[in-house]
Image: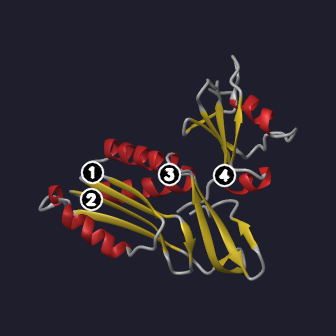
Amino acid sequence: MSIQVKFFASLRERMDRAGDEVAAEAGLTASDVWAAVADGVPLPANVLVAVNQEYVNPDHAVDDGDEVAFFPPVTGG
Amino acid sequence: MRVEVRSQSFDPWAELARYQDEASELHGRFGATAVFVGTMRDFNEGDVVHGMTLEHYPGMTERYLEDISRTAAERWELLDSLIVHRVGELNPNDPIVLVAVWSAHRADAFDASRYLMEELKSHAPFWKKERLEQGSRWVEHNTPG
């Protein structure tokens, strides 16, 4: 198993892909997942984080099989 | 209670009439219906906007809209609620969102519809990309109200 990563909207364009995959390790947080896929780009302050489709803080723990999403401020409605 | 993310254009008034007609538990019981319809403008931040693409996070968006619908039903005395939101390619004048709330009295319907709309705008994972005269741009934040 592994961790599925998703990017949306302007962040997807910036990362040049809709998603990625990270090998699960004990003690990983959502920010660690970002660091593993972002090629040295720091997590932008306004980026929102969701684990398994629920909003979380970047220090939220991530487990094997989780879906971790990063996206810019939302603009629906 | 229904939540729907729609990729095709829709008529909010026909949608509303149909939903209310089919919701037999409403018949004879509601005294108030509060309706909000959001429509695409052809201007933003001083520029002419020719169209837009609306993106969402399939799964999380529907789940979030269901969560706020449930919260509204706990917080106010509601009989029913309906949210329909567009994704995909939109043109000016196209409806983007329909929020409708049914209750026995007006205060619950007014307050719950405002709550649903504000929560949707602040947190539901949707993103707009505008098509301008030259090129396109992501909308970076919503207007305050």
Disc 3 marks a residue whose amino acid type is Glu
Q: Residue at x 75, y 56 (%)?
A: A13
Dot 4, how many residues are within 10 Å of its Cα: few (below 14), some (14-19), or many (20+)?
A: many
Decide if residue A33 is on the left or right side of residue B38: right
In this figure, which residue is indicated by the disc labeled 2?
B102
In this figure, which residue is indicated by the disc labeled 1?
B78
In this figure, which residue is indicated by the disc labeled 4?
A8
- Give the spatial CA distance, label 1 vs label 4: 34 Å
Same subunit under labels 1 and 2?
yes
Q: Residue at x 65, y 31 (%)?
A: A3
Which secondary structure, mark 4? loop
- Give the spatial CA distance, label 2 vs label 3: 18 Å
Same subunit under labels 1 and 4?
no
Disc 2 marks a residue whose amino acid type is Trp
Decide if residue B83 is on the left or right side of residue A33: left
- Give the spatial CA distance, label 4 vs label 2: 34 Å
- Give the spatial CA distance, label 3 vs label 4: 20 Å
Disc 1 marks a residue whose amino acid type is Leu
Q: Chain of mark 2?
A: B
Q: Residue at x 36, y 44 (%)?
A: B70
Q: Quadrant of the N terminus of chain A?
A: top right
- Which label sits in the foreground, 4 or 2? 4
Q: Tell me if residue B114 comes above or below residue B71 in the rendering.
A: below
Q: Tell me if residue A22 comes above or below residue B90 in the rendering.
A: above
In this figure, which residue is indicated by the disc labeled 3?
B119
The residue nearer to you, when weighing B63 against B110, is B63
Same subunit under labels 2 and 3?
yes
The residue nearer to you, when weighing B63 against A4, is A4
